[in-house]
Amino acid sequence: MKKTDKLPEVPAADVDPIDLPENAFVELGADEEYRPVMHPAREYAEVTPYSVITGLVLAVIFSAAAAYLGLKVGQVFEAAIPIAIIAVGLSGWLKKKDPLGQNVIIQSIGACSGVIVAGTIFTLPALYILQASHPEITVNFLEVFLSSLFGGVLGILFFIPFRKYFVKDMHGKYPFPEATATTQVLISGQGAKTADGGQAKLLVVASLIGGLYDYIVATFGWWTEVVTTTAYSWGQTLADKTKFVFSCNTGAAVLGLGYIVGLKYAFVIFAGSIFVWWFIIPLMGAYGSPEIAAMSPSAIFADYARMIGIGGIAMAGIIGIVKSRGIIAQAVGLAARELKGAQTQGSTPRWQTDISMKHIAYFSALALVGVLLFFWFGVIHTFWQALVAWVVVTVIAFLFTTVAANAIAIVGSNPVSGMTLMTLIIASGVFVAIGLNGTSGIVASMVLGGVVCTALSMAGGFVTDLKIGYWLGSTPKKQETWKFLGTLVSAATVGGVMLMLNKVYGFTGPDAMAAPQANAMAKVIEPMMMGGATPWTLYIIGAILALILNWLGVPALAFCLGMFLPLHLNTPMLVGGLVNHFVSHSSKDPEVCRARTDRGTLISSGLIAGGALFGVFAAITIFCGAEVPSNGGEFVPQILGLLAYAALIGYLYFAAKKAK
């Protein structure tokens, strides 16, 4: 499609395509324009009582489920995909006419659940954890609710000015793995209404295979979820003497994620991971203190080596901010021009219309005033100290918005816990300098961290929603407007669920909720506020490494993200990337290779969708009393895990090659 000043009128009788355009996932030519599924020149039903109410109900349900699972095992499942599956199923069951626009709104509102949950449970349970040793620390619903709400609102407002750059200007340059999978689910509802429902059927089959595969592992443990060398006597001896470990998650969802990410970024992520696990950790074990030498590789990773990754992520974020200074200046300049009265959206097509920058500026000012009052009257109670905290939150949340969006666009994983840890370190240093320390400093830092973590989590999740809308042709302004209501409902739900879980299970003691990220936050913040050692050397090493990587032309954020995440989650990314590579080079005919690659993307989307949806079922099963299988170190489940994983890889490869 050639670029034109105005899109042509479209007859009402025209039927929208049932699949994404061929140029949906590739860079556009100089004279090429992307045309979404829903035609830009036509109006569609998007915001309706059905779509809003359904989205809010799903936001409540998935907020509660994600909070429980995240606090129990430390993993927050992505709500966007299962919500998209439910939206498509409901619209088909209710025989909705042209439901695509409404399904996008349902998904966008409902997806608030996952991002708000991640921002909240990674930080605020640390207050309960530290309460055990510092009884004077208090936690109440209002603190949790307002921290989550303000963080989510700031994440939305701060990202909107960057929407056009990430979802339109960078078309085809980022893989957007989660957005790709969710979009394939939503578009399947179009194909299902036609005689040729092959795409939808393939997606359903792949979803069932991936979902049942992951559900069996999570609930029954027929084979191991993580294949590791430490399951064997020789591997355990090797780990004890040299700290060398190899491990791989055998899940279907992570394999599909690696396929969509592709070999380039998957290899960089894996390289960062093996740099930590095969070089840094063995070196620490061999030449570190006797205390470190006695630790297991996983303990060295958690307490020491991972800190290098945190420093690297922080520096990679700063590098990204410097490189994006032009985009940031452009967004600020646009807001300034609109505040002066200039009109910039009069001729903007429907599917590229955002909330006006004038309104964004006004709402941002109101939100920031609300944050300041919350810090002053609800947390710190001294105006100038509250003002310092407010400045820290505002600057970090705004600048790291682009970093969070970048991470999601590249690898589908948002390093919010790493960026939040760095925020806590910076904030704690500032607070101690101005005399805000001790338990009051702990509370202030954790609430501040909750706001920042939720803001960055929302920014990363929101870029997914808006990319989905861009591919399908929904109206960004409507997605942006109703995202606020989803945030409000999700924040209230998460706050209530977290307080309930604390009363029922608690966060300390033998039967407590694990809350691993919050425990890490507590471990970092307590010595800084109460007087203790902070691993500045490790942070600085990571920062210097990121600078060197950037100088060499290596994607520093992807590499350092690999250093921060566990090895068993990065290995399957490489496996999926390799499958993508072999599929895309399986024929001498470029058109056949492209068709096979696209079919593999659809199958991978199904694996991710099925894994996410059945992850919810697994959480419900566990909630109802099923015991979590603990078979990771046994010989037979390890062998079965290898065989099952090989079969899954074979299915993805050979099913993708069936494309003609």
Image (spheres, rainbow, N blue to C red):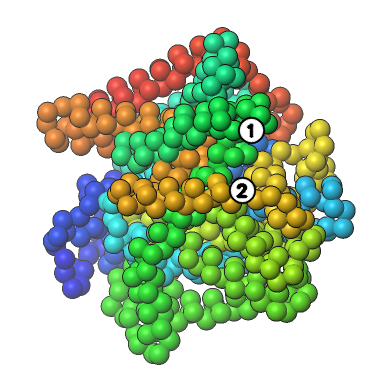
Residue type beneath disc 1: Ser
The local secondary structure at tag 2 comes to loop
Numbered badge on residue 289: 1
Whole-Å distance between the Cαs marked 2 and 1? 15 Å
Q: x and y percent of residue 391 in the render?
A: 59, 73
Mark 2 vs 1: CB contact within 8 A: no
Q: x and y percent of residue 184 in the render?
A: 37, 43
Query: Is residue 490 visible in the rendered structure shown here?
Result: no
Q: Where does the N terminus fall, quadrant-wise? A: bottom left
Q: Identify the residue position indicated by label 2 in the image.
A: 535
Quadrant of residue 28 within the rendered picture = bottom left
The local secondary structure at tag 1 comes to loop
In the image: residue 643, left or right of residue 288: left
**Outermost residue to the right:** 135
Numbered badge on residue 361: none
Placement of 400 over or under 634, stated as above or below: below
Q: x and y percent of residue 231 in the render?
A: 57, 15
- Seen from the viewer's position, the closer of residues 1 and 558 is 558
